[in-house]
Image (tube, grey):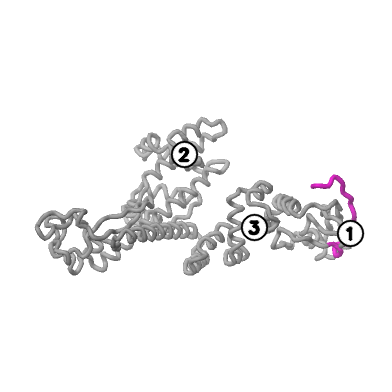
Amino acid sequence: MTSTTAVLEHLDPTQLTIDANVRADVRLDPEFLASIKQHGVLQPVVAHRTEAGVHVLYGQRRTLAAVETAQPTMPVYVVASLTEADRLVQQMVENDQRLALNDRDRTEAFHQLSLMGITAAQIAKKTGTKKTTVETALKVRANTTATEALTAGWTLEQSAALEEFSDEEATVKRLQHILEVQPEQFDHQVAYLRAERSTARLIAAATTEQEALGNTVVDGAGYGMPEHQHPHMLLRADGEKATKDDANAVVISTTYRNEVQVTAVIANFRDHGFTIREGLGMSPTAGQSGPMTDAQKEERRTVIQNNKKWDAATEVRQGWLTTLLGRKTPPKGWAQFTATTLANYGNSIARATAQKHELAASLAGVTDPDYRAYRALVEKPTTNPDKAVLAMMLAAHEADLSRESWRRPGPQAAYYLFQLEEWGYTLSEVESLITEHAMKDTKTAE
């Protein structure tokens, strides 16, 4: 506090006023009110006196409870006035120590501080909060839909997702619905939608660029869209093999690393005198009616969608693992998990210890790790060696997972995901395909 003196007075709580408070929802629970009614206010509140009266700086709940239970007087430390910013910051610290502030309270406090001209970096420093958290809270508070969600009890992270997609009404409604009916899948859905939007933006930008160059952009070629073909599949009218120089269009796609890929193709090849080369797995008449049945098309759509969902699930899962490894102690049963992994999946361990140091260090929370990061982590005096070992075990299993894992479920992937689920991880729908397959096999064997 800025004052070095305080005078203890016993004042009528109904005569006290309360300044703007960081706690948006004052929780006067029955037990708290019963205690105040029986014993009165034992710990003095802190207030300052002005010409307008005595204003409470710290102790909103106790003051309101004293009024609610009709206490005749309550102890009050009267101090010199604090600046409004310092009052809010110190009140946040006090509240967090006594009754943890919820996300709504903390966001409102950050908002009030920002209105006073205090930057996010300064707020973070004053309150001991990560700058990114402060920035996220301020974004949420600036968005009506996200603020309403926060007020309704959504977490800051969940509300931030609404702010992130606030320009897409259908997506916002989808997220609201998911939180109502499948809250455990919310993080997976957000990661999937975020990846989908990122991909759409990349493709839109690349499409604009290609069209500006005078290129025709088509949605696909080959098996999925046989009226358009890749040059190596075709013969020119003179019987010579087609080359990229014959291309009259491009297909834009993204790799699993979300990198843009532009592929030259020959659109409507038959209209331009090209024919399918024999012996390449396609009929010479392909492209007239299309070789894919409706069932095949649906299967292809499912594969594409599940691959994208797998990528999103990997991001969520590995983020969860970093949180798991960030705890003070390893999860229950980690030693047995390590022993089982060593006994049954030695090849995975060998590959991980030789090639996956960066992944292990990343899971352990190292930012921007390189190939030396895991060794540095292990050699760091403050590193818990148990967690360092577990990080490598997890990296071994993670490295063996891929988009193929959900299509061809194996016992190792199932064992690993069952273990994560036991530790509290919520499987996504596409990850559940692996564990469901394992349970089905178990029942069949019985």
Residue topped by disc 3: 107
Q: Residue at x 47, y 43 (%)?
A: 363
Dot 1, how many residues are within 10 Å of its Cα: few (below 14), some (14-19), or many (20+)? Answer: some
Please tell me whether mark 1 sits on a helix, a strand or a loop: strand
Q: Is residue 343 visible?
A: no
Please tell me whether mark 2 sits on a helix, a strand or a loop: loop
| Earlier residue among tags 3 and 2 | 3
> Which quadrant is the C terminus positioned in?
bottom left
Please tell me whether mark 3 sits on a helix, a strand or a loop: helix
| Amino acid at pointer 3 | Thr
Q: Nearer the viewer, residue 440 or 65?
A: 65
Residue topped by disc 2: 369
Residue furthest toward the left? 238
Dot 3, how many residues are within 10 Å of its Cα: few (below 14), some (14-19), or many (20+)? Answer: many
Quadrant position of residue 107: bottom right
Residue topped by disc 1: 11
Q: Residue at x 85, y 45 (%)?
A: 4
Q: Nearer the viewer, residue 337 or 277?
A: 277
Q: Which residues are magenta?
A: 1-16
| Earlier residue among tags 2 and 1 | 1
Q: Is residue 215 visible?
A: yes
Dot 2, how many residues are within 10 Å of its Cα: few (below 14), some (14-19), or many (20+)? Answer: some
Q: Residue at x 50, y 40 (%)?
A: 366
| Amino acid at pointer 2 | Pro
Drawn side of residue 236 relative to residue 414, left or right = left
Residue 147 placed where, x, y %?
A: 61, 64
Residue 275 placed where, x, y %?
A: 13, 61
Indicate yes or no whether the magenta region holds residue 4: yes
* Foreground tag (2 vs 1): 2
Drawn side of residue 313 relative to residue 219, left or right = right
